[in-house]
Image (tube, rainbow, N blue to C red):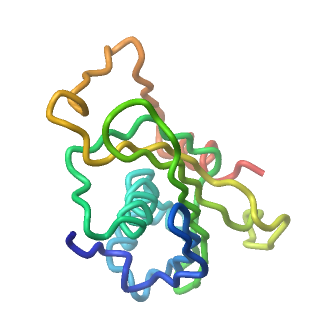
Amino acid sequence: MNKYFFEHWNVLNAQTHDSLELDITLCSEFMPFMRDHFFAGKCLIPGAVLADMMLEGCSMLDPEEDIFPLNLKNLDIRRAVHVFEKERYTIRVNVRKIENNDSGRHYACEIRGALRNSKGEVKRKNVVICSAEFALGLDSKQGKEIVPPKEQHRYDMTKAKLYEYFINTH
């Protein structure tokens, strides 16, 4: 298994044979990719990055196993993750294996963090930011399902609406 990008910034808090808890500290000083995602002085962490953090947690549970082919069964982003310039913001990734009748290994994941207002003041701690379910190491017939366009979600909005909807949610 290849090592992932976020291994350099994660801290493994707890691990059993079927679950783990991982903290990842986000900071634009040390993570150059964040510089491309600033809106109004805050870095908006892309959903793909959140999914990658959860996938990395899954791969850490079974480091000797191949993750491909994989299937992201669902991804529910409930809140935006925004980080001020040069700020260090820590999120927690929780991963657990789940039972499933399909082949492959199945995981339920979630990311938790502090709920903050537009000034960066913490209003609540340990709030669910997003959750997902992954199926990894599927046989060749699985993981190739195409989602019909009617079932896909797309957001078309201006930068101002994006900022209003995803950043100022509280």
Q: Quadrant of the N terminus?
A: bottom left
Q: Residue at x 27, y 44 (%)?
A: 70
Q: Nearer the viewer, residue 25 or 101?
A: 101
Residue 115 image point, x, y percent: 75, 62
- Residue 64 sits in which quadrant? bottom left
Q: How many marks?
A: 0
Of all residues, the one furthest to the left in this rendering is: 140
Q: Is residue 131 above or below residue 103?
A: below
Q: Is residue 2 left or right of residue 46?
A: left
Q: Nearer the viewer, residue 98 or 75?
A: 98
Q: Residue at x 52, y 84 (%)?
A: 11
Q: Is residue 141 left or right of residue 124?
A: left
Q: Residue at x 45, y 66 (%)?
A: 38
Q: Is residue 49 left or right of residue 11?
A: left
Residue 100 image point, x, y percent: 46, 35
Residue 128 image point, x, y percent: 69, 54
Q: Residue at x 24, y 30 (%)?
A: 142
